[in-house]
Image (cartoon, rainbow, N blue to C red):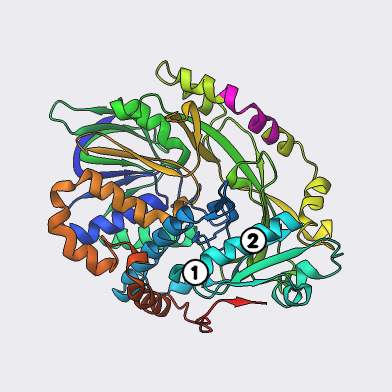
Amino acid sequence: MSKQTKTDVILIGAGIMSATLGSLLKELKPDWEITVFERRATAGEESSNEWNNAGTGHSSLCELNYTTEKPDGSIDISKAIKVNEEFQVSKQFWSYLVNSNLIRNPRDFVVPVPHMSFVQGEKDVTFLKKRFEALSVNPLFEGMEFSDSPEKLAQWIPLMMKDRKVNTPIAATRIESGTDVNFGALTRILFNQLKKQNVDINFNHNVDDIKRASDGSWELKVRNLGSGSTERINAKFVFIGGGGGSLHLLQKSGIEEGKGIGGFPVSGLFMVCKKPEVVAQHRAKVYGQAPVGAPPMSVPHLDTRVIDNKESLFFGPFAGFTPKFLKYGSMLDLFTSIKPHNLTNMMAAGAKNMSLTTYLIKQLMLSKEQRMEALREFIPNAKSEDWELLVAGQRVQIIKETPAGKGTLQFGTEVISAADGSIAALLGASPGASTAVSVMLEVIGKCFPQHVKEWEPKLKEMIPSYGVKLLQHPELIEQINATTNEALGLAGKKQTTSSALA
């Protein structure tokens, strides 16, 4: 049985991206009809789920791969600034939702957790100090501290320093304004609110096909996974936010902008400790340096996580390879994504990234004890029985032709939209969820240019820094930090006004 219906907006996938776009559009255009289709039984079950990612509010406070050393020895902090500004945008929108009583208790999804970088060896210590000197004078990174004193580090990270043989230089940076974000909880909160605002949310529904209708709208064929019945539904605008599943739907849409793009899946594993006496000894997200040949998403880190008001520790991620594009996907996902138009890029990527493929396969074959050895670089006395293995979410990196050539593997997120703005798809991975609001503002700008001027006052009400670069307005940074920290319950111990060297 098949029925035909119409709506203004369709959101495919009930993850953080669709939740964010739906929430923005409901504020901007309350009378628009929005329909959501999700193949799983609840919201936020894939990449957005709290057990499928590390929950780092990515703001470049600790992620060493967002700062690179240039040939002249100086540190390029441009990506760190970009990611930090994007996270500030997310915090502003969340604060607006709290102040509008659309989110009742921010503590349900965001808590303050210091962010730290930790390195060993003379070369990396020199790099970290230069990185600190470049960032700490920047208003976005105010309050960052540096120390190469083992005694100071023992105060900051007692679990990591206990029983550590310090026979090589070590150092760390620390900033108290970091966060742990439960993106799964936030996704569910936003969808619960959207439901109250009459958004039609359909779980256990799979979008089988998507094609352009004669009037320029989009017709979707949607299957109810419970009953097996199908329906056809038309929309003026479609957003494909289905995580790794976005690529297949983008290909089915047939838009020119999606041609040539492929995907490379990377799986992840974390070691998790829930033992209270161990967890109580560490409260920070501590990022190290990625092993040589590892993808940026494999930077090792030891994280305090707060899930359902309970603290645990995550260590990882250990990368691996599976042809699935989603955690709950099909082993045929990679193969069915190969099309005549992206075959050249896919083959070029395979040839260019043999070392990465080898690395992923080696990671996949690690025993628990070998993973424990990697963990002991962070916690020297870690006991195997205190830690269990957790399979994280799938990430699909974009493969496309760039100025660097065919088959370039892209790290990060990217919006692919049709020239007329009637459809957009989100591809890619980290920092993803942390920058969801900025990415969805990009979708709005690309897909609703005719409305942007009309919406600007509301956008500025929701996001006071909308349309400006924070770094060019230091006074705005201070003001936004004060208001968002208060709204989100992050205003704890006051940051020092000057950066500290210890």
Whether residue 286 is visible, yes or no, is no
Q: Position of residue 2 (x, y in %)?
A: 27, 30
Residue at image position (18%, 57%) is 29
Point out the frontmost of discs 1 and 2.
Answer: 2
Q: Is residue 319 above or below residue 400?
A: below
The residue under label 1 is which amino acid type?
Phe
**Mark 2 element type:** helix
Residue labelled with disc 1: 141
Is there any visible trace of residue 254 in the rendered image?
Answer: yes
Type of amino acid under label 2: Leu
Left or right relative to 375: residue 394: left
Q: Which residue is mark 2?
A: 128
Q: Residue at x 70, y 45 (%)?
A: 291
Image quadrant where residue 8 sits: top left
Q: Residue furthest top?
A: 340
**Residue visible at 17% across and 47% down in the picture:** 449
Magenta span: 350-359
Q: Is residue 315 left or right of residue 405?
A: right
